[in-house]
Amino acid sequence: MLSFIAKRLLSGILLLVVVTSGTYFLAHVAVGDPTPGLLGNSATAAQQAALRTKIGYDQPLLVQFWNWFSSAATGDFGSSWRNFQSVNDQIALRVPVTLSIVVFATLLAAIIGVGVGIACGLRPGGLLDRSLKLASVVLFALPGFWVSLVLVMWFGIELKWFPAVGYVSPEHSFGGWIQSITLPSVSLALGAIVMVAEQLRNGFLQVANQDFVRTLRARGLSGRRVTAHVLRNASPAALTVLALLFVGLLGGAIVVEIVFNLPGIGSLTQSASQIGDIPVLLGLTAVTVVFVVIVNFLLDLVLGWVNPKVRER
Amino acid sequence: MNAPGGAEPLLAVEDLVVDYRIHRKLRLRALKGVSISVGAGECVGLVGESGSGKSTLGKAVLGLAAVTSGRISFDGQDITHVKGAARRRLANDIQVVFQDPYGSLDPTMTVGEVLAEPLEVTGTSREKARAVVAEMLDHVRLPSDAVHRYPSEFSGGQRQRIAIARALVRRPRLIVCDEPVSALDLTTQSTILDLFIDLQRDTGVSYLFVSHDLGVVRRICHRVSVMYQGEIVEDGDTTKVTDDPEHPYTRRLLLAAPVADPVRQAERRATWLGLRDSA
Amino acid sequence: MTTAPFPTTLAPVKRISLWRRYLRRPLGVVALAVLLVVVAVAVLAPWLAPFDPNLVDFKLTHATPGDGHLLGGDSAGRDILSRLLYGAQTTLFGAVITCAAGLLLGVPAGVSAGYFGGATDRVCSWISDALQSVPGMIVLLVVAAGTGQSFVVLMVALGIFLAPGYYRITRARALSVRKEPYIDAARVAGVTNGRILRTHMLRAVYAPIVVQTALTAGIAIGMQAGLQFLGIGSASTPSWGQMMNDGFQNMLNYPLILLWPSIALGLTIAALAFIGSTLADLVSVRSEQPTRRDRSRVRESLAAPAPGDLAERVASGSHAHDAEDCALRVDNLRVGYAVSNGVKEVVRGVSLDAAPGEVLGIVGESGSGKTQTIFSVLNLLPSGGTAVADGIWVGGREVGRLSPGERAALLGRSIGYVPQEPMTNLDPCYTIGHQLVEPLRHVHGMSKAAARERAREVLVQVGITDPDRVLVSYPHQISGGMAQRVLIAGAVAGRPPLLVADEPTTALDVTVQAEVLELLRELQREYGMALVIVTHNFGVVADICDRVVVMKDGRIVETGPVERIFRNPEDPYTAELISASLDDTESRQELDEAWSRESPAALDRVGEKDGAR
């Protein structure tokens, strides 16, 4: 078990290094000289050259990379090229907002998705099951920002149930925080809910048709106990989908945050990308990948607990 | 050990060892130095239970299992480690019929495409291939309009006929038969066995016949090797091995299969119990 | 020589192409029509659009629909309809690039990884996992930051992030096909790896890829619009995402500007999603379940006068005992399944019975309905199956009069069940101990300690020498023969008066089969159980049964005591089955001798052919 944990952690660190390094070079190749973007077109050549020296852009790429990498390895992502504020501080300020809506959306997807999935699996072909199928077809593909625009127009502007836009921090007002993240989370979660439910429903039926379930019934076990067996066997696939969704939701949050005018990493990513502020973009990439690695690690632990065969590998 | 007639055997396997890698560190010795030979026009059976290594031996002859040591020669030529284009040329001479009549035919191909594929890879013209396919379908007693059908439209026994026809289209000299009748119903089983025998008499092809069923082996094989845990414990003429086995394992194997006669089965069971309890 | 067992021509089979079946789905047809309209609009935009999409007319700023501008004007004074039509062009062009990139990367990698396995698989899978772990939106924004206005590069980058979807689905499919014997057969037939990949493997992944492409296209269009919504892309190329951003800025005052592109985007994505889902249904990615209507249709059909060769619903088989004395009695059982064009009857009127302490064999070939009969007795038919009977008695009680709860309570207490495949009949996620103890505690009401003691006891009884190790083992850690012993232990642990066993030895080696038969015989005697054993093997019947029922095509052809059936079978089918078993068959040497006597020239002919090679 210990070697299993160590292996997963190592592979997570490897992933983090590969992705951030890859993004580093990709960004440098894609952006090229960043100074016109940072200073605007009116800047003189001298101003541009001064900025280049200041951000170290005049050094060879590999030297730049090494400077960035050795600093990033200690957890310091340097400072923004635009306002020279610490990247860490900027991200730290915004991560709670994004995490609020993404975690809330993931929880919604897990709780409602599992509930609906089991209900459909128990009564396949029923009304709920057929509705789920229809809903999953549409909501699976519709982008979160499209859904969020619809929700803003309806609940925020027409019905005025929730604030249409803006963010309230939980320290300021807990009730206000819940209110402010509800619409964004729901618009992110809708697609995720139906995906989890559909995955669990299909897995549930697949397991329910397996031989051992008939044998469990033939032993006289109650429906509830048999369902517990089926659920445990069907859960790995649904859990994997949930973990994948978390990654998807992090990306989707960027656009949704802009619709709801939330001060999360979305607007920071957008502005940094528009002016080519590479340190900020790299910091954002690293932070999100860290979250993904943590979620995947938790997933592996749960899968190992659910399925005895995984543990032995 | 030579084929009847004293001539050089068509297939000779000498002291073959095959290891399987189960795990990064764990290796399983599936064959522990096995020797057999198959003469031209002969059917040699490999009989044993699961894990005895009988299928592995068939796979090694076909080049589907990596050989650790030992030697496989075909028509005097060493084919133990032949790979790539040379192995593909061997397809002219060595073919296979698998157990599973459902998995052994590509469900997305028509029967015509299935049968023509081994010919197309040799560059046979389309008309020639069509003629050979029609002839082979006739050989295995399937109607010629079967070429436009998909495998799913046939029963298990019919599919196995198609698989046999595919093995025959290149007119091989040896067919490795890996439990070709054990997935079939009893009545179908005997007609397919008769078909195997008829085809052998007509074409002179040799069979290496892998089976777990001594009854099937007795029916079709001239000689048999009984395998147990990767070794051959007994071999010889099938009539003799099945009538009067020498090795205790062969005897147990023979007695363990129940016969369709209540009175005789009661006797056999008593003998089997005695053998089991004394062991 | 055997005679040809098949007619010279085959009966016609009705094959319906995927395309025809697709057209029978109304939702799919509507979705396809919507998509075709969008495609037509995109292609014909230059001719359909009433204005230049980039023409600015300040009078038109925020204009309401009308006055030659059907949908009004946007915040920059451009005609919304024209921009919408040209936007379709951008959208579809981007989706095609994205899908092509995803397809070209994901499918070859997936097929190779699945086929070759090993290092190829590990490397490709790691890359795919890594891609899925990267928040694509951020990296896309990085790409957009520099390449800025190059739409094609951005769409290719998007395709790279969607490639894992293709990769996973093709790899999984290729992996399962790789294990099929037809791939080995192709290799033995001398087919090159390249050709196997191009033909067999690609054919196998074709259908899921088509489904995946419809879904991917929908997602690609959504993400493309999201990027444009964030302000990525050239201002001079009209796009729906950009139009939505414009509408979003003016949402409170001019909601109509937001409405039109939202509808266009929503409709296009929904159409692609429904096309994908309809295709997925047709290649059965989602398992369809029989509805309540299907079940009542089967019930009605089974109750109605029989079609075809049976003029009336006459039961086949007979009873040897009085109903009250039977451990099991079945009267005129019919079982049917709903199929697309009606009802398929697999059991067509079966009557049988077994007394306490009696061993009844149900014997027949595949498709004879013997297993379905057993499942009906247990009330555990697979979904879609419906059983109708004049009566089923278990221990003298008619189960038709019991409530569903009471009927379920018979299982484990009054009926024990031994399945066919030992390895698939144990739950892989729980220890053997848990699976034996759970029913003892919750069905038979034992304490935890007592249940554990009883589980250990039955394991010893079924001949397991180290019960303590087996109790803590998981199913994948024990052999097939051992697993079958565990299943028998589970079936008899509650001391049921009736044990039904469905081909209990078919999946086992012969020597293990003999042991298991011996075990069943001992347990049956010890507990005085009635044993109903389903088998296709007349040897097994001869070994263990007192009476036997012979089934063919869902009917009983003959019932009788074992000695009589073997000595003097009344039905020719029974005789054929008995004679088909190969014990005491003529050996090959004997066959060859007889053959050479009949046709002396034959042996020479074989020799000639040999010489010719």
Image (cartoon, coloured by chain):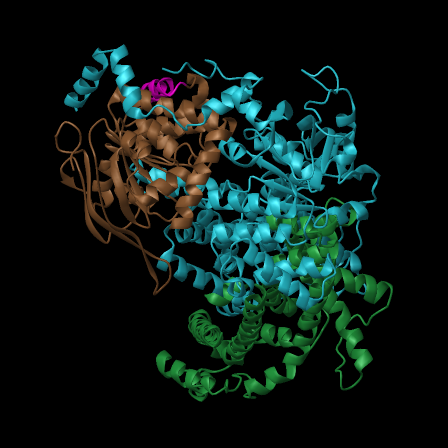
Chain colours: A green, B brown, C cyan
Quadrant position of residue C549: top right
The residue positioned 69% from the left and 59% from the top of the image is C440
Q: Which is nearer the eye, C486 or C310?
A: C486
Q: Which is nearer the eye, C290 or A48?
A: C290
Q: Quadrant of the C terminus of chain A?
A: bottom left
Q: Give the range drawn in magenta.
A: B128-141
Indicate yes or no whether the magenta region holds residue C295: no
The picture places residue C454, in percent across and down from the top left corner, at: 64, 61
Can residue C148 be seen at all in this image of the molecule?
no
The picture places residue C241, in percent across and down from the top left corner, at: 65, 58
The residue positioned 73% from the left and 70% from the top of the image is A260
Can residue B19 be seen at all in this image of the molecule?
yes
The picture places residue B64, in percent across and down from the top left corner, at: 31, 45
Q: Which is nearer the eye, A86 or C444?
A: C444
The residue positioned 79% from the left and 81% from the top of the image is A174
- Numbered marks: total: 0
C344 on left or right of C404: left
C49 on left or right of C161: right
Q: Is residue A251 above or below residue B28?
A: below
Give the overall secondary structure of the magenta segment.
helix
B216 on left or right of C291: left
The picture places residue B166, in percent across and down from the top left corner, at: 35, 29
Q: In this view, does B138 lie above or below C159?
A: above
Indicate yes or no whether the magenta region holds residue B139: yes
The residue positioned 75% from the left and 27% from the top of the image is C302
